[in-house]
Amino acid sequence: MEKVIVRLKTFQELFKRDRRPGDLVFAWMFLFFCGFLLINLGGQVQWGMRGSLVAQPAFWPTISVVGMSFFAVMHLIGSLSSPRIPGRMKEFRFWLRSLEYVVYFLAYVSMVPIIGYLLGTLIFALFLTFRLGYRRPTAFCVTAVFAVAVVLIFRAGLRVKIPAGQIYEHLPDAIRSFAMINL
Amino acid sequence: MDAVLGGIQILMSWQVLMALLIGSIGGVIIGAIPGVGAAVAIAILLPATFSFEPIVGLTMLLGIYGSSMYGGSIPAILLNTPGTPVNALTTYDGFPMTQRGQAHRALSLAYSASFFGGVFAIVCLIILAPVLALVAPHFGSREIFLAAFLGIVLVILAHRGQIMAAGMMACFGIFLNTIGLEPANYTHRYTFGQNWLTGGVDLIVLVLGLFAISQALFLMLENDSTPQAERVQGNLLGGFAELLGLKRVASVAASFGVMMGTIPGVGEFTAQFLSYTYAQKTSKTPEAFGDGSAEGLVSSEAANNAVPPAAMIPLLALGIPGEALTAMMLSVFYVHNVIPGPQLFQGNLDFVMALYIAMLLLNVIVIVFLLFSTNLLLRITQIPTRYLGLMILTLSFVGVYSLRNSPVDCAIAAGFGVFGLVLKRLNLPIVPIILGVVLGGIMEVKLRSGMARVDSPIDFVNRPISAILVLLILFVIFQHIRALRFEHQQRKLKREQS
């Protein structure tokens, strides 16, 4: 029995590592994701095509999913055998808080084809400035300059492909084509 | 010599020189701002460079890549906050020098050591280029597959203490590369019947999500910090004279940088670790290391700045990127249908030379810029970190949306942004994902074509280079297991003694 305990301790020590709050949550979530991919392996990739084993479409997905699963199990063992630092739920809530900014970002993405890159960027940047807690007029002025500069550098200067806003259709003839090309 | 002249001729256009100037100065500024870094800047600018000529786009990105570490040394020395992750070791000796009132000396030494490291590496590469042009054609499909596999093994093993996580992420990267329509038999892989997954996960969308959006989220969710530092007075050229007295340390450090940069998956951290250890072991004052040693500072800065030019070797000669930044650059080649690899080195040596000369020039531009602008850069480092997050998120939109004007790409990038944020918070590695995607694609294609030409798996290693690569892979794994065993025995011994 003593030998078994010593072996278990050695095993535990081999996997010990620095662990941050939330590590175990991530390790379980990643392992579930690997399990999901493994379950779907049969239906999502094809074997039996002409050619050798390595030429099969299923070869690399299988290698990668099996590899991911193996390392995910090992990572989970590492998490379980390392000393825990409290704060798991707090950390999990921190991850969820990031979704708020993702929503703002996606709203910005859907806004640009309608109201145009310049106006979209101005609204997005000014709103974020407010949301991040800056209240001084200087901060808003700097943000406005930054937003205009980004639009001018990328759209007017580097000519990156961003569609013109639908509202530009309603602009007077004199500035419509300029706005469609540069703003 | 013809190749060098050809290279100079390629560079002699205002677009290239302008791109080099913008890239070099932009790289220093970006490097000097803690929390941004070259990876974020390159990720954002990548799609914009697709409309340029390959040499213009590449010189701009190379400028950012090669100069960000110069800028990163400023906050590392003056604020004890590395501008880029590779400047972390610079804080060990740079900041104690600042505390002793020697900020001017530390900065001057860091600039001169960085300049020496960069130039040393480029000169080595220019001399070695004809040799590489001879060796590169001997790399066929199987050798390139094995070199890419070696890169994966090394990038996993380089994450000491996090090998399982690195392995998990590298395999995840390989998996991501397989999603979508498979090019040889046109079958769907892990698309779940969704049209938006048929095209697979775009590398740039992934890079922008994992590096730029995750960093923006990270900064916006953290508390604001606005570091303050004293102005630096005096001429910053004095470090070159002091560097003459430390030429042995600087040369060895730069050599480590060249060697480690050439090996895929290794990079700056290993080069710095080796050169710093060497400098400490051979120093007359090893106790001063970590407490403001000039040798320590020189060894760390010369090593990290020698890596970027050397990292271009596997990329240009074999088409194998050794780390995340060169992986991003690979996409510039692909977009312009310029395939890096043995043919490029053999048939377009002047193009390769043009890139090396551009790197040489960028070092000169950066050092001149830094001599006059260090105090100005100090003011830039004082931008509040949450505001920086706002700027990065706004700029990330251009990078993702301008690719295909696809909201789906933006949603995928945002998803990877959250994933990257979680990894950063847990201190888990991100780079293996990118290398997994890029090297996974290379391994799939090269293994398929390599195996088609052999009768049995043994034939796969019947050529000298492939045999050496297999031995190298086995050696690296064996050495790692030995090191783990040794560490375990040491711990056991310590426990028994206590």
Image: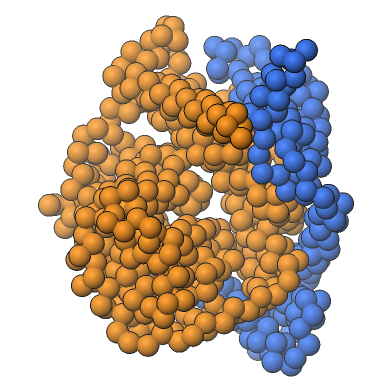
Give x and y (percent) for residue A60. Answer: 61, 25
Residues B424 and B60: in front is B424
Residue at the far bottom in the pictured view: A137
Give x and y (percent) for residue B83. Answer: 51, 67
Which quadrant would residue A177 be assigned to in this image?
bottom right
Question: Which residue does the image show at 70% across and 54% down from the upper left?
Answer: B425
Which quadrant would residue B182 be assigned to in this image?
top right
Q: Which chain is orange?
A: B
**Whether residue B327 is visible:** yes
Residue B368, placed above or below residue A136: above
Question: Which residue does the image show at 51% across and 34% down from the upper left?
Answer: B157
Which quadrant would residue A131 be assigned to in this image?
bottom right
Residues B467 and A122: in front is B467
- Say whether residue B70 is left or right of residue B203: left
Residues A63 and A144: in front is A63
Question: Which residue does the image show at 71% across and 44% down from the upper left?
Answer: A19
- Say whether residue B130 is left or right of residue B376: left
Residues A136 and B314: in front is A136
Question: Which residue does the image show at 18% across and 48% down from the upper left?
Answer: B127
- Say whether residue B359 is left or right of residue B266: left
Residue B128, placed above or below residue A142: above
Q: Colour of chain A?
A: blue
Residue at the far top in the pictured view: B455
Give x and y (percent) for residue B388. Answer: 64, 73
Quarter of the image where the C terminus of chain B is located: top right
- Say whether residue B243 is left or right of residue B457: left
Residue A49, placed above or below residue B312: above
Give x and y (percent) for residue B424. Answer: 67, 53
